[in-house]
Image: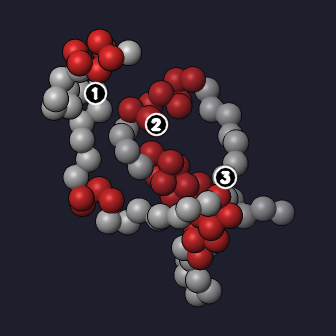
């Protein structure tokens, strides 16, 4: 083990796949010393009353070509699908 320690470089070796972080990346970090404390802090960050409702996760099945085209349209494709469904519901009210 002493041989390995003696052979280790004095300065850290740069890793292109895992660059060092900068202070700005940590400004919104939640620090805690235990899992229960972390849970309490994260729960406290939820939206308050009067805020817009959160989206509800669901599963929907698309044909492969349809899904590929939606994803190819770029970031925000799920929001655009949501807006398209909202528009469709305006003219196709249930029941």
Q: Is residue 11 visible?
A: yes
Residue positioned 59% across, 83% down in the render: 48
Name the secondary structure under disc 2.
Answer: helix
Residue positioned 24% across, 41% down in the render: 20
Distance in Å between CA atoms under marks 1 and 2: 30 Å
Measured from the top left, where is residue 78 in percent x and y?
50, 48
Measured from the top left, where is residue 54 in percent x and y?
60, 67
Judge left or right: residue 91 versus residue 68: right
Residue that badge 3 annotates: 57
Residue positioned 62% across, 32% down in the render: 62
Of callouts 3 and 2, which one flags the residue occurring earlier in the amino acid sequence? 3
Residue that badge 1 annotates: 17
Would you call the spot at circle 2 few (<14 residues within 10 Å), some (14-19), or many (20 or more)? some
- Mark 3 vs mark 2, foreground winner is 3
* Position above or below: 60 against 24: above
Of callouts 1 and 2, which one flags the residue occurring earlier in the amino acid sequence? 1
Measured from the top left, where is residue 23 in percent x and y?
24, 59
Image quadrant where one finds the C terminus: bottom right
Of callouts 3 and 1, which one flags the residue occurring earlier in the amino acid sequence? 1
Residue that badge 2 annotates: 70
Name the secondary structure under disc 3.
Answer: loop
Judge left or right: residue 47 versus residue 26: right
């Amino acid at each position: 083990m002493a041989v390995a320690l003696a052979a280790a470089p004095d300065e850290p070796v740069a890793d292109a796949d895992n660059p060092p972080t900068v202070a700005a990346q940590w400004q919104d970090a939640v620090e805690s010393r235990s899992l229960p404390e972390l849970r309490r802090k994260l729960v406290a960050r939820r939206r308050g009353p009067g805020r817009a409702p959160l989206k509800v996760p669901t599963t929907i099945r698309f044909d492969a070509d349809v899904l590929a085209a939606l994803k190819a349209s770029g970031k925000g494709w799920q929001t655009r699908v949501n807006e398209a469904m909202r528009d469709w519901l305006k003219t196709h009210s249930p029941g």
